[in-house]
Every structure is written in C-alpha cells, then in structure tokens.
Amino acid sequence: MKQPLLIFILLMGTTVLWTQEIKTLNPNIELLEFSKEGEQEFNRNWKACEIIWEKMQSGVTYENLTAQEQKDLDQVSEVHSDYWQVGTDGCSWYCGASIAMVSASSYLKTQGKTSYVPKNAHDFDYKNAWVEGVDGYGVGEFLEFSFPQENPRITQISIVNGYVKSEKAWRENSRVKKLKMYIDDVPYSILNLKDERATNHFEVAPIGNADRNNYEELAKLPDWTMKFEILEVYPGEKYEDTVISEIYFDGIDVHCFAAGTMITMADTTQKPIELLKIGDEVVSYDIEAKTYITAVIEEVAHPIHSNLVTITFDDQSEIICTDDHPLLIANGAWVSYNPSKTIKDYDYDQVHQLKIGDVLQGNDKQQTVASIKTTVAAQPTYTIVRLDKGTNFIANNIVVGTEPLRKKINCDIHQSKGNVSK
C-alpha cells in the first residue's frame, strides 16, 4: 500500500510544480477613446490632407502651406488611413508573418448585419469583435491562432478587451478578466486584463521557431498554435456575452538595418537611417538603365531584430542588416545571407546566397565582401519599406532592396466543429 501512496504523492508534487511554472503576466495599457464625433473629425482632416498632399506632389513645400494647412497636416498620419484601423499601413511584424487559421470554441450568431465570428478578433478593425456563443459568461470558451513554423518570432501580444466600438457597448457587454494562454495546448501563462476600454499589451520572451536558417524544412512542419481560454470575466451591465475586439502580435525577425546606417539622400548628403521620414528624397538605382534616380520615401519601419549580420568589405567599411535583407551584386542579381526567407516573405523571385568574394553594387564604386559575421543580440532596426518609384536605396554606399511584401492571406478563417449559436 505504501508504493501507490508514494506514487500519488509524487504525482501531486509534479502537478503543483507544473502549476507554479505557469507565469502570470500583467499588461501595459493603451487607452482607446472612439466616438462618432472622433470619426467625423478624422474623416474631415483626412479629406483636407488629401488636397494638401496633392499640392505638395505638385511642388508646394511644407513651409509654403498656410498655417491652417500645416495644422491639418500635423493632425493626420499618412500611414493611418482609417479611423477604426488597428495599427498603421507601415511595416511591422506582419511584413514577414502570416496567420494560418483563427478558430474559436463558439461564437454568437449573426444579428442583423453584425457578425461575431472568430475572424473579427484578427481583422485589424476596432469596430468588429468576437463574441463567445454559449449560455452564461463564456468561461472555458477560447480563441485559437495557428502559425506556420517559419513565421518570425512573437515578442508582444496585444488584446483589445471588450466591445470597444463605443463606450455604451463596452459597458453593456462583459469583458475578460483573466485569460489562460496555451502554446500547442500546453499552458504558458495567465494574462491579467484590466477592466478599461483599452488595448492590453503583454511582453513575452520570443515565441516561435528560433532556427531561422532553413525555411524549406520549417515549412514542412505542422503549424503551431496559441490558444486563449476565458477564465474570469468582468460582468457587463446588460449582457452576459463576453467580448474580445482584437488580438494581434508584434515581434522580431523582419529584415532591416541597424541604427547608424547612412542613407544617401537626393542632394548627395547622407542621413542616419533612424532619422528618415516619409517625404524625404533619397537616391535609388535604376538597374536596367544603370543610372541613379531620385525617389521619395512613402513608408518606413523600425522593428526589433536579433537575426543580424555584419558584412565587411575589402576597404574595411561595413553594413549591418538582417540576414534576409536583399543586396544588389554588380551583375544586377539580388543576394542575401538567408535567401530562402527573402524569397518566401518578400517579392523577390530569385535571390542568391551571399558569400565572401561577392562584388556588390555601390554608390560610387563596387564593394567586395571580405567577411560575414552573424549577431544574435536583439536591437532596434530601421528600413525603407516603399518608395514612390524604384525598389532600392543606398545604405552605407551599397544598393539594397526595399521591402515589397509578397502578397498572402494573413488570416484564413475556419469555424471550429463545436461552434454553438446563441
């Protein structure tokens, strides 16, 4: 009789240890204040700025605008084109990532023209929401995201809690108090959400596959999953239905350059990449004509990365970029340290392996690669995502590519078999 008891005690001890290993995470809060008046004001400002941008494209400078036009312009960001848009039009973790599937244990049936399906929790629109579909507060119901193995890693999870489209909808419907998060059905953490009309940002250690070198093999592996299960709720004033408006992600491993990289401007001066802004004019290289042209920056990005390489040339100059950033060699072909990833995520159909001895196209001369060294420490990075013409710019006197994202579906949505209407 002692042996079974000992086994039972050991099992209980293991269970306690496992429970203790589940982390409790608390968020940083970003308050949200949407209103009909705010939407109307945004749309008025946007229409005014469209006229101003057209004038500036015709040669009118910011200094020559009226005081009111300058005020209107300062109130609108070109990369945030919709009042209800989650995030911006600029590059982010999603430039190199995709969501294979979003599903849920249940969802509330459509009411009129308003749906509450799982995809609403990842459509980058604050107006839409996922609502669980069982009686009561939905404790035990969940959302699940599936990710390809070759995705860049996740370092931030952002949860827009409750029905945030209006203050009234937020108060009347229930919100999540605690979520239990699973990775491949293994408990990972408890997320404590604030009872505020806000986005809850949770910082996490990198989640995903750290092996960034063999994308062909990673692509053959089954998707991995992240599940969010409702544990506790803040009751709504009118409805028991528990609502999540959005869950989205940020992370590392999208290609860029290190701070301090010098970009050649149209006036032949050089500016650190971290100081570039939309509207700046830079030099771009016309590959077919083999001439240099002027291009205007339309989009920039600055994510955190740890997959960096330092490329040193025979004159001891160097450039630090992510391992998948495309570089132009003298014969007009593109190369990168991780060509399979460059091809997979970005609109380059043929990219060759960067190697010592390659001759890269430079600004005023060609540069020969003398050494390549990888770096794993995470650090801020920067890049130009899009120009008004051309697909490259000059960084540390080397012609490098912009980031034309390969078109793909970020969120194929499938209903789970156990969906329950309400």
Image (cartoon, grey):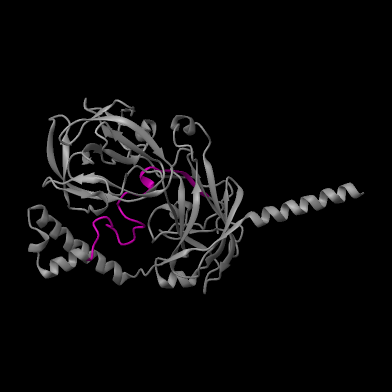
> Quick check: can you spot residue 347?
no
- Rendered residue at 15%/29% (across/down): 288
- Rendered residue at 72%/53% (across/down): 15
Quarter residue 401 falls in:
top left
Residue 143 left/right relative to 346 = right
Quarter residue 64 falls in:
bottom left
- Residue most extreme to the right: 1
- Reply yes or no: does residue 263 show up in magenta: no
Q: Position of residue 27 (x, y in %)?
A: 49, 63
Q: Position of residue 142 (x, y in %)?
A: 56, 54
Q: How many marks?
A: 0
Front residue (pair 269, 66)? 269
Residue 52 vs 262, above or below: the answer is below
> Quick check: can you spot residue 237?
yes
- Residue most extreme to the bottom: 237
- Reply yes or no: does residue 99 show up in magenta: yes
Image quarter hosting the C terminus: bottom right
Q: Position of residue 356 (x, y in %)?
A: 33, 27
What type of secondary structure mainly makes up the magenta span? loop
Front residue (pair 28, 363)? 363
- Rendered residue at 7%/53% (across/down): 58
Please state the extent of the stretch shown in magenta in the rendering: 75-103
Residue 189 vs 306, above or below: the answer is below
Q: Position of residue 266 (x, y in %)?
A: 13, 46
Quarter residue 39 falls in:
bottom left
- Rendered residue at 7%/57% (across/down): 60
